[in-house]
Amino acid sequence: MATFISVPLKKTSEVDLVKPLSKFITATYPTSEEQGEYLRTVEELNKLRKNAVGRPLDKHESSLEILLRYYDQLCAVEPKFPFSENQLCLTFTWKDAFDKGSLFGSSVKLALASLGYEKTCVLFNAAALASQIASEQNLDNEEGLKNAAKFYQLASGAFGHIKDTVLTSLNREPTMDISPETVGTLSIIMLAQAQEVIFLKATSDRMKDAVIAKLANQAADYYGDAYKQCQYKDNLPKEVLSVLAAKHCIMQANAELHQSVLAKQKKRFGEEIARLQHSAELVKKVASHYDEYVSVKDLNDKINRFLTAAKKDNDFIYHDRVPEIKDLEHIGKAAVVKGTAITYPISQKFTDLFEKMVPLMVQQSMSTYNQRKAETVNRLVGTMREATNLCNGVLASLNLPAALEDLSGDSIPQSIAEKARSIVQQGGLQSIEQLIRDLPEFLTRNREILDEALKMLNDEETTDNELRTKFNQRWNRTPSGDLYKPLRTEGDNFRSILDKAVQADRVVQDRYNAHCEMIALLCKPENELNAAIPSANPIKTLQGSEVVTVLRSLLAQLDEVKKERETLEAEIKGVTFDMSITFLTALGQDGSINEEQLSVGQLDQLYGSYNQKVQASVRTQEELLGNIQTSYQEFSNLKQSNTEANQREEVLKKLASAHDSYVEITSNLREGTKFYNDLTEILLKFQNKCSDIVFARKTERDEHLKELQQSIAREPSAPSFNVPAYQSTPAAPSGGPMPAPRTVFAPGQLQAKPQPPARPPPPTVVPQAASTAAPTGPPTGPGIPPPMAPPSQAQGPPYPSYQGYPGYYQMPMGYSPYAYNQFNMPNVSYVPYQATPGQQGYPGTPPAGQPYPGYPPQPPQQQQYHPQQ
């Protein structure tokens, strides 16, 4: 079976998706029905991740489908949650797929708070698993060939997609396995294997040789490109380079083989032989260099068979000239495969778990739209309330309508009595004072929440700065100060809001202090209130006058305007419109949302008519107040001018103004209480956000610190230095054991003493079974021993130098390097020794039984010498 390259899967650490996503859902979707459904969906997403990357996967299409479904779900979830380091912080840790770890058990890994990083790694695993599934296919049948080609193209497309998107997805340097250079190389390898599978299918289908040759030539081209790129990838396994080189030669050989058949059909017999010879050379190269990885025996036999027949026919029949391979026409190429485009969704069975949740861009647009809507409503309602307060203030200054009701001069005016009862029903002074006492507590609570949130950021940033100062460039993660800028801006905004709220509370307190005496008077029983109001002489002559009638009519019209405003305010607050559909439509059509244009247009359409009604109400009030002031001037001129009447009217004005102030102060205090309570919820969310990001940063910091400490521990404790040559042991020459001297000096360090020539090595014992083999080396004969291979390595301890011959070694007692009588030795002669110039020759061989000159006589041999030991 052909050898194909598959890619190992990346490994990851467990990540809890439930807690952070549930927090975001709980804070964003207060509706219980939506919230419950989304929380259950988060559980499903967590299970999907565990199934996809949290366990070993079988090399089967069903496992690949799980990976692709999880990748599609990540693509669907990404626009619906604010995944980032300073918002919804989820840290994903993945190991390098090609890293085998070190001696201490650690391996290269990267942890990032980026969903794009998770998507990239999951897609890498999908591509790797597709390559493994393709490699497991049975290429002897058509279905297996089709599946292999499909999965290789999917893997190529996935690796190519990572190459184009990884840098923008991570915004930092990735691990080597998902770097653009590595995944680009893997993409070409997968494409080459897909092209080879198509070549095998074309061969199986017995397509035309011209087509098959072009398919094989294109595959060879792909393998050649992959080989060139892979030469510089130290992280890829070494055998990958060998397989690519072998496949490049094999595909070229197949291309030449099928092109030779085409040449034979065109009666170009010389070209046929040239191509077959080139093909045979390529296969021979594979067999000699890469036979460990691929087998080319069948292809080699086929090419040699064709070549022998072609040469025979040409020698005896055609006598066609065999051209040089460089002079032959180039074989064409046919690229019939391409990487599968990675478009969402990849899985055909994918269903979005968060289908009902709107994208984050729509959520943000909806939030901004709601703010614009609230501003519009507040502006309209505020305009009406401001006009009403102005109206009440004018009437109170004129003591209307109390002045028209108090013509008797000795009883409580009806309007003042109603105002007094209204204040008592609302709780009087006790109610308003309780609201005033509660505000500082609410303020203090909110300040404490905000201070605690910012303190967490400050503490973590301080620790990060200390570690950055300690480790300098080694501490290469994002600085906390840069990461927390949006949160600090948000915190400053909250602090500014609280400061403004304190100023508003002070204004309300001052107003209460100015009117509390009259408010307390309105809270007293009716008889005490009547006694506190000065009496005046009756002015009965004014009861039926025309001016009184006009004033009452104008006041009635003014009361009608106020009632219309209450109805209009309820209508304005009750306007609803689902803007999310408009934003979703715009997002689907344009891929973006122009929130300002869409929101302003829709708000103008919804509140344009109400704005006109509010302005008309204000104009009507201004006209009525002008008429009232004119009529009141006439009324005042008709009244008798005396001190008692003026004092009574002044008190009635203060009571009317105190009632209006009570109503406004109570409203302000309740709004302030609601404001502080609402702000508490917002600040708690802000505090949780700060807590989550600080926790994520601490987790990342601890993991980064652990890796940094391990890397520091693995570093050498001292800088590298050159070891003196006399302390190093030279590598033993290959070819056999050889005793080594105790000390060797490198050339140039010490001047070497002149040494006598080395003594001749002992003869090689040739086994009986191998003695008949034909010699392949230099000729041997009398006086010429067979060549000796140099020893491969030192064996045993070095022997002490013999005093008479520096550099020679005395053999231990009982050791005889020439134990002639111990073995059935063949006749061995020695090559005459060629002396080194300037030295005496080596003494010749002594007669039999005589010792060498200069050597002490040896005792009788007691043990046999085994050359192989």
Image (cartoon, rainbow, N blue to C red):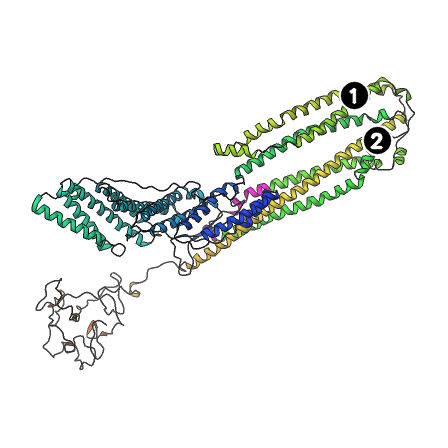
Neighbour tally class for label 1: few under 14, some 14-19, many 20 plus, Cα within 10 Å: many
Magenta span: predominant SS is helix
Residue 451: x and y, percent? 63, 47
Question: In terms of image quadrants, where is residue 297?
Answer: bottom left
Residue furthest to the right:
537
Question: In terms of image quadrants, where is residue 211?
Answer: top left
User: The residue under label 1 is which amino acid type?
Assistant: Ile
What residue is shown at x 25% (from left), y 73% (from top)? 799
Q: Is residue 498 visible?
A: yes
Neighbour tally class for label 2: few under 14, some 14-19, many 20 plus, Cα within 10 Å: many
- Which residues are drawn in magenta? 471-490
- Horizontally, residue 581 falls left or right of residue 797, namely right
Q: Is residue 24 visible?
A: no
Front residue (pair 270, 20): 270
- Horizontally, residue 473 falls left or right of residue 330, namely right
User: The residue under label 2 is which amino acid type?
Assistant: Ile
Vertical relation: 124 (above or below) 400:
below
Instruction: Judge whether residue 489 is colored magenta.
Output: yes
Residue 271: x and y, percent? 15, 43
The residue tagged 2 is 416
Vertical relation: 271 (above or below) 595:
below
- Horizontally, residue 662 falls left or right of residue 677, namely right
Residues at marks 1 and 2, CA–CA distance in whole angstroms: 19 Å
Front residue (pair 571, 836): 571
- Mark seen at residue 628: 1
- In the rendered image, the quadrant that contains the C terminus is bottom left
| Circle count | 2
